[in-house]
Image (tube, rainbow, N blue to C red):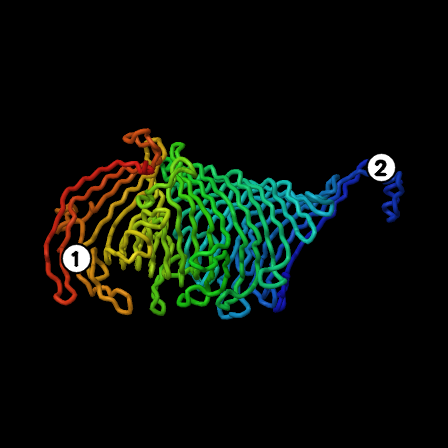
Amino acid sequence: MMTHNLQAPYMPLRTRFRAAILLSLTALPLNALASISGMQSLNDEEMSSVSGQAGLVIESETRATIDRLSYITNGNGIHFDGIELGAASQEGGVTSQRHDISLRDSGSMNILFEVDGRRLTVDDIRLSDRPDLSMGGFYLDQNRIRGNLTISPGGATSDSGFGYDLFYSSTGGRFGYRTNDNHLILDGLGLNFFSLGMSLDMEGDVAVFRAPQVGGQFAVGAIRYGQSPDNFRGALNELPSMGGLTLDFGFSSRFDFQAGGRFGNEGLQINSSTLLNRGAFIYSTNGYNLALRDLSGESHLRDLRMDVARDGSGRLGLALTLGEAEGELNIGRIELGNSGSVGGLNLQWLYADQLVNDRNYSNQVFIQGGGNPHSGPQGLRLGAEWSLADGQIGYTTNGNTLYITGIQSWGEGDVTLDVTRDGTLEGTEFYDGLRIGFEGMAGGYRSEGLRVGSENAERQAGMELLGLHQAFEYDALDGQITLGPIGEGGGEGLLINADIIIRDALSGALLNEDDTGVWAAGRQHDIVLRDMTLQVTDNGLALVLDEGRQLLDIGDLRIGHRDSSHSFGRVSLQTYETGSEMTISGLGDGSEGLRIFRKRILAEEVDDDRRNRFVWETGRQSENGVPVNGSGLQLVLENIHTSDGADLTGQGGISNTFGLQTDTRINVRNSTRTAGEPLGLGFENRTRFRELNVGSMDLVHPTGGAATALHGISLQNMDIRSDLVVTPIR
């Protein structure tokens, strides 16, 4: 049941309008005019001589405010507070609109509409159990709207329904999402679309909405970030841009709406099917595009329910729970800058309930107020659980396809969304931008592996060369990723700051069907990224890292079954990089494929948190059956770093600008060095460095301390090339 509960009085609704009802009369006899002047009824003969057109023109200026609008199901409510409809240009101003309404001979009604300078504002969105917390507020500007809506009697399946045709165009719009006086702004919004042959019918107790032909374009001129206690108005060119978006689309859809929620009699049930006939998505920075072209696919939602209800922890939220979601997305070409196409992708998915590790997982999200508790009272919290029962990824280059099949994923935890600013609040460090937080996440994924040429081809190895694990599970994932603008003359693009902490993880590689392979158990992973920029350039997608730190600690490295007791021991790798770069692009030679160029600047040791270090430890002592790190014999490589071997910058000392460079080209191709030239995953790689140094190699005894075996190791001027094609074992 939807309740529009106006729990506080309306503020005045001020509308000024002019209406003209026009009746044009032609070829009307004088005696009929006399009858009209006396307000007398016309007889049939007189009526037959009348021809004309009826219409209604409404011009209005409006400002309206509503204290609270509520949606309530089963006694629980979500409240939209501080709603205002008025002028976009000035606070307290009115918005103007015009509607030309006419009736056609077919019985349909045609409405031409124009809206200029309108803003819709919602100050806060709250849940009934936590009025102290808010999901934040938003404002939507519709600066220039032009459109035409035709409403016809009769739906697609019954005379009691209605049909609709719509043409819509808007330019110069804006959407702002605000938490704690920080704003994420979609500026320069434009939407042009048409929807023909729409219909609304009642089929029993189900409202069926059909949209058989929809097409158009949506654009975001700039994604901006700003700080202000008030909502922004006017031009915002002084605010830095994170880039722009364009979406072209053509699709058909059907939605079935029915009463009834998951947690009671009240709520909403939705089933839908959508067929994407065409599409393109473009993200642009500084005039260069990351483009996903030739999009097509389909999506089916079954038994999606919407309630205001409590999650498993007793927290109230707007609950979206799903029975099943099945679909497919085809991306014909992926283009990065002017480097050409990297190939195409095919994604397939089935989200449904599944049993993993003796626990049932489903798909649901509870939207709640309050993001990170230290950022302020406004923000979004998503209590989520997901279950990908089956999925598949296909990567195609030059007509050949590589498949990752049998993908499953599951998990639960909280995701928080806040718009934050630089500073430290209650011991938590924040950055300018949209902060995506992770709290108490636990889950994992696994897949069957790679297949080349066909979905049913023989399974093979090679995922590890792509930097992917065949299986990965974790008991705890916490942290944040903040996406902000580069600013300060850096041009359009994203500035990324991140802190990710993973605990008690298990990963598997080179796995056979019986789960034997290489397993990394007791895995701990800390990742810190500071001021990493992401921009689309002429050469492709460029990432430049100001500072990066990682600690990967594997408690037990095993070969065999995942539960094997035989172990190589503990392996720990700590990295510290400054000024590293990565560019992802097409091959640039006219053929399809992926090129990844990396330059890693391994910096010299600064402190225990900022260093490059490798540890192998065996023979650890145990406490309560748990091995204790540092209690065994260790082989330690200290202060690993790159250098140029000389001063190449003129700043004195030995410079470190060349780093460890890796240029990798990936495509799906035939092996010319194997009998029968089988199809496989191709890797062409070149690795270079001028100087790679190790400060010392130490042997550390738990009681006897450290002894340096080698001091000052240096490898110079290495250039290693390789070309391989990974195929199934024959």
- Dot 1 amino acid type: Leu
Tell me if 176 is positioned left or right of 521 in this view. right
User: What numbered label is drawn on residue 596?
Assistant: none
Measuring 86% from the left and 42% from the top, which residue is drawn there?
Answer: 33
Tell me if 621 is positioned left or right of 561 in this view. left
Badge 1 is on which residue? 635
Q: Point out the tag, 2 or 1, that comes first from the N-terminus.
A: 2
Tell me if 651 is positioned left or right of 574 in this view. left
Q: Quadrant of the N terminus?
A: bottom right
Task: Tell me where residue 395 appears, x and y as whole percent.
Answer: 40, 39
For this rendering, which residue is in front, 279 or 218? 279
The relative height of residue 110 versus residue 608 in the rendered view (above or below) is above
Task: Tell me where residue 621 appears, x and y as whole percent.
Answer: 22, 66
Q: Secondary structure at mark 2?
A: loop
- Picture quadrant of residue 331: top left
Task: Tell me where residue 275 appears, x and y as whole percent.
Answer: 55, 41
- Dot 2 amino acid type: Ser
Tell me if 165 is positioned left or right of 392 in this view. right
| Closer mark to the observer between disc 2 and disc 1 | 1
Residue 437 seen anywhere in this rendered image of the structure: no
Task: Tell me where residue 150 appears, x and y as whole percent.
Answer: 67, 43
- Picture quadrant of residue 155: top right
- Picture quadrant of residue 453: top left
Picture mark count: 2
Q: Secondary structure at mark 1?
A: strand
User: What numbered label is drawn on residue 49?
Assistant: 2
